[in-house]
Amino acid sequence: MVRTLFVLVSTVLIAYGARPATAQDDPVMPRETEAIFAHIDDLDKLRLLNPLNLTAGQLDKIIPLIKERQKAYNRRIIELAVEPLKAVANQIADTRRKLLSGGSIPQELDDRIKQLQKDFADRRKVEQDKNLKLVSDGIRAVLTERQIREIVAMARRDFRTADGTDAQFFNLWIRETIIVYDRIVPLLEEMRKARNAPSTSS
């Protein structure tokens, strides 16, 4: 039960951008080191984005699309996670109070939370599929045929063990490169700014 409840609660915390509380003397990674790790991740994504040669005009359409989809998706996931928890909040609090002096978690509550977790996972999968289609269709409409072919070729190269149509490989690339990367918006915004910057090449 602890694991299933943790997944539900952590989903809400992550969506709100909250972090678990830590002791003041816990070791903290230096900001400079965090930045290095972020830059390494960015390099991996730029390896996939740069072959497309996205124009400033294309980025001006893609960035707002992703921002809006992220906002709408996160809002929906929060709804899916929060509403079921409201129904068991009092029971959880009451059980916690009783367990402080000993005892075990009632099987009925354990089973109920496991069912909530399963329902949440099923509904989240529906929202993930819906979001993928909306993002994929929106970005595809902005790209040229050459760029679309390039994405499919990269996906077929990087996911050799997968089978599917060109459309499925396109969606796979969009999911792995765009949707699951939490820094994709700031990265694309930096790319957009760089396309306005004067050339530094000699």
Image (cartoon, rainbow, N blue to C red):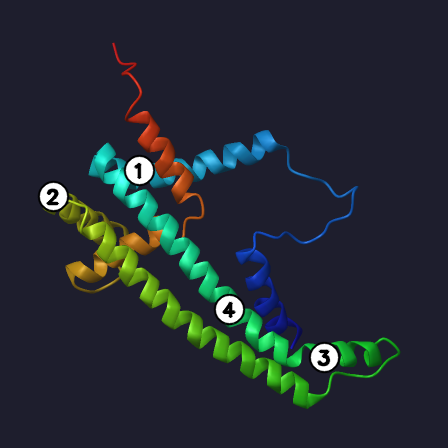
Of the 4 image quadrants, the one containing the N terminus is: bottom right
Q: Nearer the viewer, mark 3 or mark 2?
A: 3
Decide which of tag 4 and tag 2 comes sooner along the chain: 4
For residue 99, above or below residue 70: below
Q: CA distance from mark 2 to mark 1?
A: 17 Å
Decide which of tag 3 and tag 2 comes sooner along the chain: 3
Give whichever of 17, 40 is nearer the camera: 17
Give whichever of 92, 174 is nearer the camera: 92
For mark 4, what is the residue? 79
Question: Which circle marks residue 23 in the picture?
Answer: none
Q: Residues within 10 Å of mark 4 (few under 14, many from 20)?
A: few
**Apparent side of residue 100 relative to residue 128 in the rendered image (left or right):** right
Q: CA distance from mark 3 to mark 1?
A: 50 Å
Residue 164, located in which quarter of the rendered image? bottom left
For mark 2, what is the residue? 146
Residue type for callout 4? Glu
* Secondary structure under the numbered disc 4 in the rendered image: helix
* Secondary structure under the numbered disc 3 in the rendered image: helix
The picture places residue 29, in percent across and down from the top left corner, at: 64, 37
Residue 89, located in which quarter of the rendered image? bottom right
Decide which of tag 2 and tag 1 comes sooner along the chain: 1
Q: Is label 4 in contact with label 1 (beta carbons under 8 Å)?
A: no
For mark 3, what is the residue? 90
